[in-house]
Amino acid sequence: MLPEPTARLRFRPMRRSDLDDMTAVLSAFDPVRPGEGRRTRDDAVRWIEWQERNYAEHDFGLWVVEKHDGTFVGDCGLTVQDVEGVPHVEVGYHVLPELRRQGHATEAARSVRDCAAANGVEHLVALIRPENTPSQGVARNLGMVLERTAHVHGAEAFVFGMRLGQS
Ligand SMILES: CC(C)(COP(=O)(O)OP(=O)(O)OC[C@H]1O[C@@H](n2cnc3c(N)ncnc32)[C@H](O)[C@@H]1OP(=O)(O)O)[C@@H](O)C(=O)NCCC(=O)NCCS
């Protein structure tokens, strides 16, 4: 499965040769989490390996998002997340700092949401830390609403979600 291209963006599977770009996007300073440890190149290696397992197991994962000229933008896609013991399909997104606030995450995530709907996902969530207002903005742009809070990966998270109809 692969989301449809959009006006500015296209998707492709993440591969080992994306390590430099994925390190850049994952280790970037995050203004909403200024005190938190930054992810490393080794984390990016594990991130790419995780997507390879996701593609094999689910036929989805986080895909590389790039402009039509091949410029790397970030990643966006679907993963299965455990929310207090129950698996949920989550939409996730990461954009290079210099390309943020231009609608890239929203544009990519809308195509991922439509791809999920077309492939039978009935309920899509985004697990977002309360301080991460940019990510909440993307979730709202997708039509998600705050459904509840949950304990995820050792911290309190907002569970944004929406029902998806089969297209
Ligand atoms: C979250 C992230 C992917 C958003 O990417 P983006 O391409 O800048 O998002 P968009 O331009 O589509 O913005 C969508 C909405 O988010 C909100 N938003 C984005 N950046 C914001 C900011 N710095 N402050 C407040 N709201 C913001 C706005 O509501 C915006 O809509 P608007 O442009 O109409 O005002 C990006 O900030 C990022 O990579 N953050 C680090 C990784 C991350 O936190 N991922 C999500 C994990 S849950």
Image: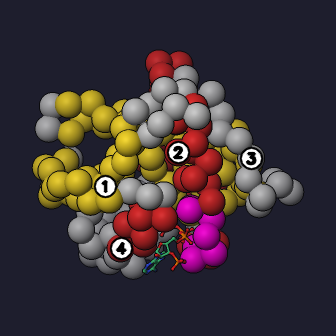
| Amino acid carrying mark 3 in the image | Pro
Does the beta carbon of the residue at mark 4 sit less than 8 Å from ligand 1? Answer: yes
Q: Amino acid at mark 4?
A: Thr
Which residues make up the magenta segment?
100-106
Mark 1–mark 3 distance (CA, rounded to whole Å): 25 Å
Circle 3 residue: 5
Which residue carries the number 1 mark?
160
Q: Quadrant of the C terminus?
A: top right
Q: Looking at the image, can residue 109 be seen? A: yes
Instruction: Residue at the far top: name it.
Output: 57
* Nearer to the camera, 97 or 124: 124
Comes first in the chain, label 3 or label 4:
3
Give the structural element (helix, strand or loop) at label 1: strand
Task: Measuring from the top left, give residue 7's x and y in whole percent.
Answer: 78, 58
Q: CA distance from mark 3 to mark 2?
A: 13 Å
Q: Could you tell me residue 74's position as x and y percent?
A: 60, 56
Q: In the visual, does 119 lie left or right of 6?
A: left
Of discs 4 and 1, which sits in the foreground? 1
Q: Mark 2 — residue? A: 113
Spatial CA span between label 2 and label 4: 20 Å
Q: Mark 4 or 1 closer to N-term? A: 4
Amino acid carrying mark 1 in the image = Phe
Q: Relative to 74, does residue 167 appear above or below in the rendering?
A: above
Q: Give the mark, 3 or 2, whose residue is nearer the N terminus.
A: 3
Q: Amino acid at mark 2?
A: Arg
Q: Label 4's element? A: helix
Give the Cα separation between the discs numbered 4 and 1. Answer: 12 Å
Residue 88 position, x and y percent, is 31, 35
> Could you tell me residue 118's position as x and y percent?
57, 31
On the picture, is 96 further left or further right than 91? right
| Left or right, residue 164 beside residue 11 | left
